[in-house]
Amino acid sequence: MRALRAFSRGEHGRSRLRPYIVALAYVVGTSPAAAQAPLPPTTPRFVEVTRLAQEGYGDSARAVIARILSQTRATDAAFPEALYTSAAVAKTLGEARLQYARISVEHAQSPWADKATLRLAQLDYGSGNTESAVLRVKRIFTDFPESAVIPVAALFGARAAFERREGPLACDWLTRGLQQVGSDLELKNQLEYAKQRCTPEELARLAAIPKSDSLKRPEVMPPKTPVTTPPATTTAPPSAPTTSGKATTSPWRVQVAAISDPTSIRRATQQIEAAGYMVYRVAGPNGLTKLQAGPFSTREAAVAAVGKLKAAVGGAPFVVKAP
C-alpha cells in the first residue's frame, strides 16, 4: 500500500501531479487487438494504472486515477490523458462513456480527442446503436483526417454503415482506411476483407433493402455493466457451448457482451464463433444475456484471448471465472 500511495503522489514523494507533455502524434498499434481495445495511455504513470486494473486491482486503479484527477487542473496537458485512463479502468460502461465524452467535447483539441471519439463509436456499435456510431466516425474523418485511428475508425464505421444499408459510405471509409493503414498487415487484411462487399451487385442489393426504424436500436448496455472487473453475482448455468455441445470444467472465460437485443446477441454469437471460440450464454440482471467465450484452462490464456475477441466482436471484453 505504501508503494501504491507513493505511486499516486508521484516520484520523490511529490503530492502534485508533475505536468506531462502529451505527444501530438500518438502512434496507435492498430492490430486487431487495438482495433477493439481501449487505446492505451502512454505516460508511464497512467500505464501503471491500467496495468493494475488488468491484473484485477480495479478498485486500487480507480482510487489512484481519481486522486490524480483531483490534483490536476483541467487546463493541464495531462488532464485529457488522465480522463482517458479513468475511462479505461472505469467500473461501468456509463462511467467510461462519461469520461470519453468529456474528452471528446471539452478537450476536443487535445491529442486524446480522436481516441476518445473512436472509443465512443466502438461502444455505440457494440451496443447496437449504429446511427450514433456512424455519426461519430464521420466526425473522426472530418475533424481528425490525419489521425492514426483513421484505419480502425474506418473498419468500425464501415461495419455500422453496412448495417444501415449505407454501402457507398462504408466503401469510401474502407478505401480511406486502407490508404492510411500503414504496415499493420492484420488490420489491412480486415479492411480488405470488409471491402470485398464493395461490388456493384452488393451495393445494389443493399440499396434495394428498405431502411427501418430498427436500424437505430437503443442502448442495451446498462450503466451497471462492469468494464474492467467481473461482477460478483450469482448467475444461471451457461448454455452448452455452440461449437462442441459439451460443457467444460475449465475455470476461465472472457465475457464479451451483456445485451438483450436478439439481433445483437445473434450477431455477437456468430462473431465469437468465427473467432474460433465456444459461446456461453449466461442469464444476467434486467433481462440481459451475458455472452462469454471460452473455455480457458488458465487466467493467462483468457487474458491473451481478450485482444482477439475485441477485434472480432467489439466492446470491452474482460476475463471472468466460469459459473
Image (cartoon, rainbow, N blue to C red):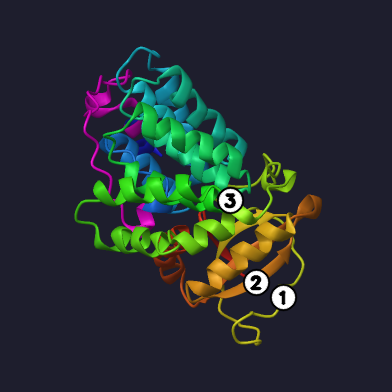
Disc 3 to disc 2: CB gap under 8 Å = no
- Residue bearing the label numbered 3: 165
State whether residue 92 appears in this view: no
Residue ID at (46%, 58%): 310
Q: Quadrant of residue 71?
A: top left
In this rendering, does residue 144 appear at all? yes
Residue 130: image location, x then y, percent: 59, 44
Give how far apart the Cα atoms at labels 2 and 1 are: 5 Å
**Between marks 3 and 2 in the image, the one whose residue lies nearer the viewer:** 3
Percent x, y of residue 100 = 48, 31
Tell me where residue 176 appears, x and y as whole percent.
Answer: 31, 45
**Residue contact at pointers 3 and 1, CB within 8 angstroms:** no
**Is 286 in front, or is 32?**
32
Residues packed near mark 2 inside 10 Å, few (<14), some (14 to 19) or many (20 plus): many
Q: Residue at x 33, y 38 (%)?
A: 41
Range drawn in magenta:
7-34
* Label 2 or label 1, whichever comes before in sequence order: 1
Quarter containing the C terminus? bottom right
Alpha carbon separation for disc pair 3 and 2: 30 Å
Disc 1 crowd rating (10 Å Cα; few below 14, some 14-19, many 20+) is some
- Element carrying mark 2: strand
Q: Earlier in the sequence, mark 3 or mark 1?
A: 3
Q: Is residue 30 magenta?
A: yes
Dots 2 and 1: beta carbons under 8 Å?
A: yes
Residue identified by numbered label 1: 239
SS category of the residue bearing label 1: loop
Quick one: 285 or 164, which is closer to the camera? Answer: 164
Quadrant of the image containing the N terminus: top left
Mark 2 = which residue? 280
Residue at x 61%, y 36% (from the top left corner): 94
| Residue 316 screen position, x and y as percent | 51, 51
